[in-house]
């Protein structure tokens, strides 16, 4: 249905209102079902149901949606699959904080009622997120929406856990893990953020048990000293070879511990002596294992001191530290306190300082899985990182990976499918509960959120049912889009899990983008108060403007800065398209044929041939750049063609025909304008879906949505280098005259004499054949075009691509100013010549760039040198007249 109501000014609210629901009602986001079409799929990186989407989400999903819309228009059978992540630790933290405001804890509610509260939270924020997806215009198939805790994904999680357990790749053991005392749960290494905190080295006396003196031990954490079970020195340290085997006394508790020798100790760091506390330090844990040392835990799960801490029992760890330091000083054990700033781990979710804690947890044995993933990167089935350098980030992490602690002491998440016999203590691991559940108790822990999200690309497609239609059709997926900060957390895990359980890579490409920073380059954060809500931006500028900013500012792997100036520019660009489209549509009549039809165009003038050639070049450029994920360059190509070529020149030049008396010429010009605008809207649609749909529905066509229209393709018959070169001559000439008018303060309304000296007869013929455009855009009083033209002595001069322009304005000319102006032009030519000479002298450029590109640079160099010679001659002529 044609919609022809277009206001005089682009109003994003009116354009976008109701459009998304119409798309949903029309089913345009669903896969085509055409089995002959090549499938193309993207699964959305599932946002956490912890809150609203931020600008990073908007950037991420805009890239994905642009790719999906682009491929859909190219005829692919596309699937853009939506879903959300339960985000165990993050969501539970949010709900517990909400409960604390009400004066209750999860323990007051109990597990079942607490989980009900979390589901309420999930439902609320899932609804918010879906409305935000709609405002962004994401072409998602909601019939396939998934959640990491839905039954299908839970089944996949259980199958993966059981298989890895049966193969010995999942095990349970007592190890030192990262512990969040506030949330009271284990954390993986990559859930720990290191920050610089103020602290101290406490230098403490540890007396010899035989009373012969003491040794000096430096520690940053005196509250753990009650867990000390030895002091270690390097076995090759000559200073201490005679004391290995002796006993010392732990201060304040009078417990004897031995001095041992272990390679772990660095001789030249500090005193070369290290206290060993296996229950509170991962390195000490390994030393303790080698020497069969006791493990003494001094803290409770909430960060308070336990019964092994003596009189400090029940005290908060930091309060205990102060008390212990005071007692060490009072009892003459403290030698000195040395203030330092050191890196300390903090929980990514709660912000609490992390404890290294001895704990029984479930782990994934990572080495075999990492080796498999690294081996895969050597073959044809590798995952292609864009930019390629991020493969190095992936490889480095995989080569140095530690076993992954996957159990979390939470209630919200996938319950670990392990049960313990109430009588024998036997462990049962299975996809289903034991047949006599009354005799078994299920493990109370849940799995790390990343355990389930690592299965996302294939579990969302129906796996483990490998006969699922979606799994067979759309897996592996084509492209993952995500930030570089999540390569460790998620990308790596999806790769090794997919290879392990499906034998296939999870996606062909992973496109890595950076972070969105504020105008000062700072990371957006609550503490700085510099966050930007993408929905607020949409309310002011529209989704299309935000999407354009995010795409054009998108260089893979690089951060970008948000600014309202850039948003103003994005809105102005859309308004330019809107006004140009409105002009075209207002000039259509009921006889204008459908937009793809040029069959009735029989005569093409120079501007027509030129705009079709430029359009075709833009189609090829944009398609090539989108296929290479070079979104910013694709955007710049579109901008230059639409703003400069189409709006500023072709439309303006078309007005001469549209206001003329030749009815047939008018009809043909309308068809050409309609054709080019149609292609522009289709080129822009993947990035700006709303406004392009609105304009497209205002034009004659036979489709219900531009989303389902065909993306523009190459037309060899449009290629026309001669027309492009001739138009460049004409445009350069008009620009030169306008510039001289501006500098001479001669407005376009005043006719002036214009003398043009073409470089050759061919250019002369071009100018004479298009004299109407020179008349319209330069407004000459007397116009001379001749290759034998003698330059007037007192005239302002412009040297363009193929011509010399003279405007005799004797009464306005100051010879010194004119010479200075020409010398400035000469300087510009020198810079361009130097730039291109440098490029052409670069063997790397000449050998790797396409031959066409190299030839273009050589041609430009010759042109600039010729212009420089002409300018030099003109300067000499002007100086004679001084």
Image (spheres, rainbow, N blue to C red):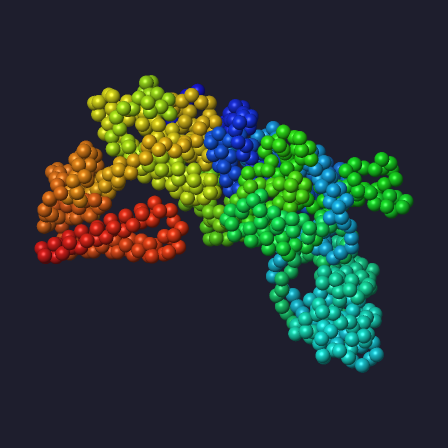
Q: Position of residue 836 (x, y in %)?
A: 31, 53
Viewer-nearest residue: 398 or 590: 398
Viewer-nearest residue: 747 or 31: 31
For this view, does 153 lie left or right of residue 612?
A: right
Where's the N terminus, which quadrant? top left
Q: Determine the residue positioned at 67% across, 33% down.
A: 466
In the displayed structure, 81 sits above or below 522; it is above
Q: Position of residue 662 (x, y in %)?
A: 22, 22
For this view, does 80 lie left or right of residue 277?
A: left
Q: Determine the residue positioned at 28% across, 22% down.
A: 667
In the displayed structure, 551 sits above or below 817; it is above
| Quarter of the figure with residue 416 | top right
Viewer-nearest residue: 345 or 121: 345
Residue projecting furthest to the bottom: 212
Residue projecting furthest to the right: 423
In the displayed structure, 59 sits above or below 221; it is above
Q: Position of residue 48 (x, y in %)?
A: 62, 41
- Does residue 843 show up? yes
Q: Determine the residue positioned at 70% across, 37% down.
A: 156
Viewer-nearest residue: 517 or 163: 163
Q: Position of residue 36 (x, y in %)?
A: 53, 27
Where's the C terminus, which quadrant? bottom left
Q: Determine the residue positioned at 21% across, 36% down.
A: 777
For this view, does 535 lie left or right of residue 696?
A: right
Residue projecting furthest to the top: 590
For this view, does 485 lie left or right of residue 733?
A: right
In the displayed structure, 277 sits above or below 599; it is below
- Does residue 311 show up? no
């Amino acid at each position: 249905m044609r919609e022809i109501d277009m206001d005089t000014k682009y109003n994003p609210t009116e354009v976008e209102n109701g459009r998304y629901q119409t798309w949903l009602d029309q089913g345009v986001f669903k896969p085509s079902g055409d089995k002959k079409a090549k499938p193309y799929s993207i699964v959305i990186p599932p946002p956490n149901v912890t809150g609203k989407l931020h600008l990073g989400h908007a950037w991420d999903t805009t890239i994905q949606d642009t790719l999906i819309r682009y491929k859909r228009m190219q005829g692919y059978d596309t699937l853009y699959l939506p879903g959300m992540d339960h985000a165990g630790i993050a969501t539970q933290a949010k709900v517990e904080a909400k409960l604390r405001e009400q004066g209750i804890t999860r323990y007051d509610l109990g597990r079942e009622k607490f989980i009900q509260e979390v589901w309420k939270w999930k439902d609320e924020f899932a609804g918010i997120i879906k409305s935000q997806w709609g405002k962004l215009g994401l072409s998602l198939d909601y019939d396939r929406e998934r959640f990491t805790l839905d039954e299908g994904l839970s089944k996949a999680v259980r199958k993966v856990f059981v298989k890895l357990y049966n193969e010995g790749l999942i095990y349970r053991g007592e190890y030192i893990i990262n512990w969040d005392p506030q949330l009271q749960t284990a954390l993986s290494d990559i859930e720990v953020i290191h920050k610089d905190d103020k602290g101290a080295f406490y230098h403490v006396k540890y007396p010899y048990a035989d009373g012969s003196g003491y040794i000096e031990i430096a520690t940053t954490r005196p509250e753990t000293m009650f867990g000390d079970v030895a002091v270690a020195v390097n076995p090759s340290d000559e200073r201490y070879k005679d004391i290995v085997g002796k006993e010392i006394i732990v201060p304040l508790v009078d417990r004897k511990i031995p001095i041992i020798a272990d390679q772990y100790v660095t001789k030249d760091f500090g005193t070369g002596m290290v206290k060993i506390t296996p229950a509170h330090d991962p390195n000490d844990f390994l030393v303790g294992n080698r020497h069969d040392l006791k493990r003494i835990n001094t803290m409770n799960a909430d960060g308070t001191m336990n019964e092994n801490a003596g009189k400090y029992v029940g005290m908060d760890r930091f309060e205990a530290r102060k008390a212990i330091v005071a007692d060490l000083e009072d009892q003459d054990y403290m030698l000195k306190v040395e203030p330092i700033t050191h890196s300390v781990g903090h929980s990514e979710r709660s912000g609490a300082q992390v404890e290294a804690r001895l704990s029984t947890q479930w782990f994934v044995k990572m080495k075999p899985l990492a080796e498999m993933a690294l081996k895969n990167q050597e073959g044809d089935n590798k995952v292609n990182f864009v930019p390629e350098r991020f493969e190095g980030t992936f490889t480095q992490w995989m080569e140095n990976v530690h076993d992954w602690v996957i159990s979390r002491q939470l209630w919200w998440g996938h319950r670990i499918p392990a049960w313990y016999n109430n009588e024998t203590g036997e462990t049962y691991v299975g996809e289903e509960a034991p047949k006599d559940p009354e005799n078994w108790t299920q493990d109370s822990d849940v799995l790390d959120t990343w355990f389930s999200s690592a299965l996302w690309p294939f579990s969302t497609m129906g796996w483990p049912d490998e006969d699922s239609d979606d799994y067979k059709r759309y897996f592996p997926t084509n492209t993952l889009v995500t930030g570089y900060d999540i390569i460790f957390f998620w990308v790596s895990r999806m790769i090794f899990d997919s290879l392990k359980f499906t034998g296939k890579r999870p996606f062909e490409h992973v496109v890595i983008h950076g972070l969105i920073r504020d105008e000062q380059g700072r990371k957006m954060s609550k503490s700085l108060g510099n966050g930007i809500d993408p929905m607020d931006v949409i309310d002011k500028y529209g989704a299309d403007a935000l999407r354009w900013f995010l795409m054009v500012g998108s260089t893979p792997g690089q951060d970008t800065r948000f600014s309202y100036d850039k948003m103003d520019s994005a809105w102005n660009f859309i308004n330019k398209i809107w006004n140009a489209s409105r002009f075209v549509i207002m000039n259509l009549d009921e006889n204008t044929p459908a937009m793809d039809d040029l069959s009735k165009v029989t005569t093409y003038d120079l501007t027509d041939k030129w705009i079709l050639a430029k359009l075709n070049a833009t189609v090829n450029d944009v398609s090539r750049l989108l296929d290479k994920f070079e979104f910013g360059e694709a955007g710049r190509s579109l901008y230059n063609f639409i703003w400069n070529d189409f709006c500023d020149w072709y439309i303006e030049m078309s007005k001469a025909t549209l206001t003329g008396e030749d009815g047939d010429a008018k009809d043909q010009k309308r068809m050409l304008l309609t054709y080019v605008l149609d292609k522009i809207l289709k080129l822009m649609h993947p990035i700006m879906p709303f406004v392009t749909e609105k304009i497209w529905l205002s034009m004659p066509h036979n489709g219900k949505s531009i989303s389902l229209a065909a993306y523009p393709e190459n037309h060899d018959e449009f290629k026309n280098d001669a027309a492009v070169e001739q138009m460049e001559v004409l445009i350069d000439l008009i620009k030169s005259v306008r510039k001289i008018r501006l500098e001479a303060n001669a407005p376009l309304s005043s006719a002036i004499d214009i003398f043009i000296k073409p470089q050759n007869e061919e250019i002369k013929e071009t100018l004479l054949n298009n004299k109407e455009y020179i008349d319209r855009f330069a407004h000459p009083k007397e116009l001379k075009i001749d290759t034998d033209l003698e330059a007037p002595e007192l005239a302002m001069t412009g040297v363009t691509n193929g011509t010399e322009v003279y405007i005799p304005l004797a009464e306005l000319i100051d010879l010194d100013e004119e010479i200075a102006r020409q010398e400035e032009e000469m300087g510009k030519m020198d810079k361009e010549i130097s730039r291109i000479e440098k490029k052409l002298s670069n063997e790397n450029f000449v050998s790797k760039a396409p031959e066409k590109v190299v030839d273009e640079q050589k041609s430009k160099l010759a042109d600039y040198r010729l212009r420089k010679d002409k300018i030099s001659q003109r300067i000499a002529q002007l100086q004679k007249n001084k």
